[in-house]
Amino acid sequence: MVVLGQLLDILGTLGVRECRGPVDRGAMLRGLALYDPSDPGTAAGDQVMLGVGIDSPERAVRVLADTDAAVLVLRAAFSLDEGVAHAARDAGVPVVRVDPGVSWGQLVAVIHTLVFGERAAAKAAAPGGLFDLADTIAGAVGGPVTIEDVQARVLAYSHRQQDVDQARLRTILGRRVPDETLEALRSQGVFAHLDESDEPLFVPELSSELTARVVVAVRAGRELLGSVWVEVDGPSPWGRTRRWSPGRGWPRPTC
């Protein structure tokens, strides 16, 4: 856990441009939430809300009217005008605007480590652990990585998480794959492939929030333990991969 004052001091080193509204520097922060336009009031009073997709002062004002978050963090080019400042004071929720040159991936990594404390930092730094493995894979293939178990819970993720899509952000923040993302991948046969094959699979962009990925199964013998996911720009960072095609079933392995 971390108090709001410490969080603001650390974010200041990344490039905080403005902070409006009341700031209780002693307020304890215990969690993270991602702005959801369909339900903007989901953040609890001890959570940091990341305002992904808040692209104007007017939208920021609407979000502040609905949220109970401890602080709203924006990565935005627009300034926090008097309307935002007034809304922040009325809501009792401070608003922090970070330079848009700082990626959401960087913000997630920093805030996650601060909020969830030394244990998260130790895991991320532990040599030979899953976080170290995720960083090694990310360095080799050039894309952000998550390692997940068979229940789609996040076991580790790479330090490199720059310019990732919203599905990836939600996965890391919630420490599991969101239900709507699971359903989209399941409907395309991705998990059926993981059950049957050890070959890396390229999954093209399915929506603006779910961009292209390569996934490969992790096994002990023939038992499926989980999977490694890499967000990619093209179909084949690992050489030969199977490619998903709409309306086609997967051939069963010949072994």
Image: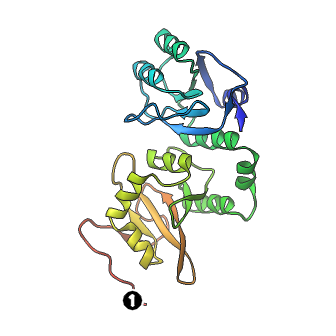
Image-based side of 24 in relation to 74, left or right: right
Q: Position of residue 66 (x, y in %)?
A: 45, 25
| Residue at the spot 46% in from the left edge and 31% down from the top edge | 41
| Residue on which the image places disc 1 | 254
| Residue at the spot 37% in from the left edge and 60% down from the top edge | 185
Q: Is residue 99 visible?
A: no
Q: Position of residue 187 (x, y in %)?
A: 32, 63
Looking at the image, the residue that sits furthest to the left is 247
Q: Is residue 3 visible?
A: yes
| Quarter-of-image position of residue 245 | bottom left
| Quarter-of-image position of residue 132 | bottom right
Image-based side of 128 in relation to 255, left or right: right
Quadrant location of the N terminus in the rendered image: top right
| Residue at the spot 35% in from the left edge and 69% down from the top edge | 243
Q: Disc 1 residue type?
A: Thr
Above or below 76: residue 242: below
